[in-house]
Amino acid sequence: MSTSHTNRRLIVLGTVMALAAASSLALIDGLHAGPAWVHWVGSLVAVAAAFGTVVIAELSWQRAINTATAAGLVEVDSHT
């Protein structure tokens, strides 16, 4: 797989996770009636989507740092 295709897939995955989190939060906030399990499932989806978004952002950030280091745009930290 090419790097651009992988980057595009990460962006799409992050967008889907963010939409799932937003939809779940709207579901939790908007539904004042209904079974309790709906609220639990909505909460779990929101937490999972938020965690997934953070993981994707961290992976994208690390890839950006590695690309910049390989291109010589940033100096390698010798203190770590």
Image (cartoon, helix red, strand yellow):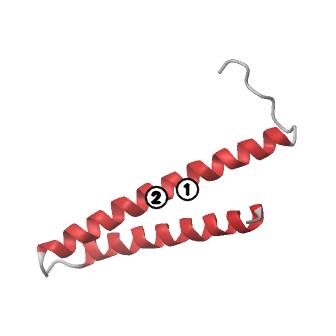
- In the figure, residue 24 lies in which quadrant? bottom left
Looking at the image, the residue that sits furthest to the right is: 72
Q: Position of residue 69 (x, y in %)?
A: 80, 38
The crowd level at tag 1 (other Cα within 10 Å; few <14, some 14-19, many 20+) is some
The N terminus lies in quadrant: bottom right
Q: Check disc 2 and report the residue beneath it.
A: 52
Left or right of 34? Residue 60 is right
> Which amino acid is tagged 2?
Gly
Residue displayed at 55% across by 56% down: 56
Residue displayed at 47% across by 67% down: 17
State the residue in front, 35 or 71: 71
The C terminus lies in quadrant: top right
Q: Position of residue 52 (x, y in %)?
A: 46, 58
The crowd level at tag 2 (other Cα within 10 Å; few <14, some 14-19, many 20+) is some
Left or right of 36? Residue 3 is right
Disc 2 to disc 1: CB gap under 8 Å: yes
Residue displayed at 69% across by 63% down: 7
Q: Is residue 20 above or below residue 80?
A: below
Q: Position of residue 12 (x, y in %)?
A: 60, 71
Circle number at residue 35: none
Circle number at residue 56: 1
Left or right of 26? Residue 74 is right
Left or right of 32? Residue 27 is right
Q: Position of residue 22 (x, y in %)?
A: 41, 70
> Which amino acid is tagged 1?
Ile
Q: Secondary structure at mark 1?
A: helix
